[in-house]
């Protein structure tokens, strides 16, 4: 009698077809309403506040044709991927090392928790003093941002491994190393992907913020440069690029996750 | 693993405190080593940072700037958080609406909100409003999905029982759905609030004339690393204070029930 399905987006059962139609129709209407609102905002507030959708699209096209869009995206991805790789490797290996010693884990836990609260971006101006305006300050910030996410999720994953599986493997004579690889790593994969899915978009986002503060190239540089000369169309176009970039990355990561975890029967509650 | 012969609970705790102290000493030693190696111009010493921190607290400067940042974060958390909690509660009986909104919410959740900071500065100027807007955009989606998860995880039997006993829709929402979703809502806020504070600081770094982010930027421009570190320290303490407050508030609101698994679903 009460209509609280397990998942509200669930559209099965009677009248599923018309319901589906309603949902897709609603989404389309909402999309059109958002674009109309954007256009209306541009007309009432003026192009200095709201770049019209058409002007933004034209700018995006011009950026795509001239190749600047690709150059900016590659510059941003270069830093994001490098920082992500460093932080990802350290953030996965460290919990595996700490697994062996409960004492060391307990000893560093408060320090890790405290430093996790540092707004890492706030270190950027100081890092700029150190490393100049190249990739380095951004790289350090991205690495720090990603490290904590990967470290914490990997750690939670290792702690969440079913102890019985490990005992069982020991009984049938598996080596410690084999246990690490076969049981812990496999059990960890969902957590690893959760961490990855949170961390990689965060890395791109961190790079863009880093580029706001200092840089000579990249998507963030384009947005902030446009803002400083009151080129609102440029700001809009840049934000659209940043949005599309991150959402595309999200979609790719989701697809990879589904593929890598296809052996799992159902999604368990593994979200952090 | 058990090379220490069965330590008592007391000695175990004592050992843990010693370990924690040792870690702090090691960190401070490394920091001092860096100061000694590179000079105070590049890496301020821990002692100088502590003194500056106390000085700036005493002069009221640090607290004033922290107050601005805190106001921005708090206003943004309220403006973004309240609708984010209400929306899933109101839409509980309208799954089609939730399904329509879903791709937009997932997009908003995944969107790099921090990258929107210059846009908000264009719209709202370099004052507090642009920072509040950024915090709102960060907080809203996190809390929305946390609350939605809590509402969905609701025990349908409780609702049915209440309805059989003649509870109105409003009573069900207030007495069953909202209290049941509180842990999930707080799980969302626990993630959203530190992120919100960081967002306020970032917006201040980009363009502002007050707040902790401004203090950091100003310190860096004057090559005053001690000032930078003191401001970063203050921001860190602010984050921890906010998290502590969230936990205290949740503990108070959930007095009536036994503690649950702290890991809650918080995102799509």
Image (spheres, coloured by chain):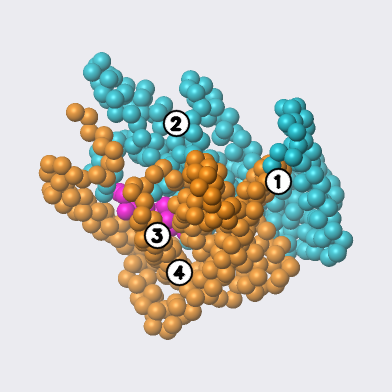
The chain identifier of the residue carrying mark 2 reads B
**SS under mark 4:** helix
Would you say the residues marked 1 and 2 are in contact, meaning their CB atoms lie under 8 Å apart? no
Q: Main secondary structure of the magenta part?
A: helix
Q: Which residue is mark 4?
A: A238
Residue occupied by mark 2? B182
The colour applied to the residues of chain A in this rendering is orange
Give the mark nearest the N terminus, 4 or 3: 4
Few, some or many C-alpha atoms within 10 Å of disc 2 (few <14, some 14-19, many ≥20)? some
Asked if residue B161 lies left or right of residue A165, the reply is left
Q: Which mark is residue A95?
A: none
Query: Is B207 situated above or below A63?
Result: above
- For the residues labelled 1 and 3, the Cα–Cα distance comes to 32 Å
Q: Where does label 3 land, which residue?
A: A260
- The cyan chain is B
Q: Give the residue at mark 1.
A: A104
Mark 2 on the same chain as mark 4: no
Q: Is residue B196 something that shows in the picture? A: no
Q: Residue farthest to the front?
A: A172
Q: Is residue B105 magenta?
A: yes
Residue occupying image coordinates x 39% and y 56% = A261
Host chain of mark 1: A
Task: Say above or below: B158 vs A203.
Answer: above
Residue A22: percent from left, percent from top? 17, 49
**Residue at 33% of width from left, 49% of height from top?**
A265
* Stretch in magenta: B101-112
Label 1 with label 3: CB-CB less than 8 Å: no
> How far is the residue under mark 4 from the one under mark 3?
33 Å
């Amino acid at each position: 009698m009460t209509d609280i399905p397990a998942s509200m987006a669930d559209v099965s059962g009677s009248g599923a077809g018309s319901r589906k139609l309603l949902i897709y129709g609603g989404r389309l209407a909402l999309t059109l309403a958002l674009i109309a609102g954007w256009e209306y905002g541009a007309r009432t507030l003026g192009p200095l506040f709201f770049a019209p959708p058409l002007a933004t699209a034209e700018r995006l096209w011009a950026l795509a044709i001239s190749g600047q869009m690709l150059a900016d995206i590659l510059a941003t991805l270069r830093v994001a991927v490098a920082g992500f790789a460093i932080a990802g490797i350290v953030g996965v290996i460290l919990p595996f090392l700490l697994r062996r010693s409960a004492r060391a884990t307990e000893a560093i836990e408060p320090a890790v928790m405290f430093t996790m609260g540092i707004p890492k971006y706030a270190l950027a101006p100081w890092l700029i003093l150190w490393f100049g305006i190249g990739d380095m300050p951004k790289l350090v910030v991205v690495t720090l941002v990603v490290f904590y996410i990967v470290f914490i999720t990997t750690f939670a994953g290792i702690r969440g491994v079913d102890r019985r599986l490990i005992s069982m493997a020991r009984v049938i004579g598996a080596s410690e190393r084999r246990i690490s690889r076969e049981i812990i790593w496999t059990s960890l994969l969902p957590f690893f992907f959760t961490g990855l899915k949170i961390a990689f978009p965060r890395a791109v986002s961190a790079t863009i913020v880093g580029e706001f503060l200092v840089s000579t190239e990249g998507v963030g540089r384009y947005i902030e440069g446009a803002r400083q000369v009151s080129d609102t169309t440029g700001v809009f176009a840049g934000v659209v690029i940043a949005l599309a970039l991150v959402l595309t990355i999200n979609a790719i990561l989701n697809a990879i996750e589904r593929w890598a975890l296809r052996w799992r029967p159902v999604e368990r509650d593994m979200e952090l | 693993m058990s090379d220490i012969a069965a330590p008592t609970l007391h000695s175990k705790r004592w050992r843990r405190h010693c370990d924690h102290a040792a870690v702090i000493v090691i960190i401070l030693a490394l920091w001092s080593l860096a100061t000694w190696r590179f000079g105070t111009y590049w890496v301020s010493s821990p002692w100088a940072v502590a003194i500056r921190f106390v000085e700036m607290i005493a002069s009221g400067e640090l607290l004033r700037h922290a107050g601005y940042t805190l106001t921005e974060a708090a206003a943004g958390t309220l403006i973004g958080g309240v609708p984010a909690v209400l929306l899933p509660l109101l839409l509980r009986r309208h799954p089609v609406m939730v399904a329509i909104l879903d791709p937009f919410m997932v997009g908003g959740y995944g969107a790099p909100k921090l990258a929107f900071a210059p846009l908000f500065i264009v719209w709202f100027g370099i004052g507090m409003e642009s920072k509040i807007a950024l915090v709102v955009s960060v907080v809203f989606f996190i809390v929305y999905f946390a609350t939605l998860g809590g509402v969905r995880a609701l025990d349908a039997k409780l609702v049915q029982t209440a309805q059989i006993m003649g509870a109105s829709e409003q009573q069900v929402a207030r007495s069953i759905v909202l209290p049941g979703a509180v842990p999930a809502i707080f799980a969302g806020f626990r993630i959203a609030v530190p992120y919100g504070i960081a967002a306020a600081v970032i917006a201040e770094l980009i363009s502002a004339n007050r707040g902790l982010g401004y203090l950091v930027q100003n310190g860096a421009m004057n090559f005053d690393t001690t000032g930078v570190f003191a401001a970063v320290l203050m921001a860190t303490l602010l984050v921890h204070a906010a998290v502590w407050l969230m936990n205290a508030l949740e503990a108070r609101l959930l007095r009536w029930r036994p503690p649950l698994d702290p890991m809650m679903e918080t995102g799509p």
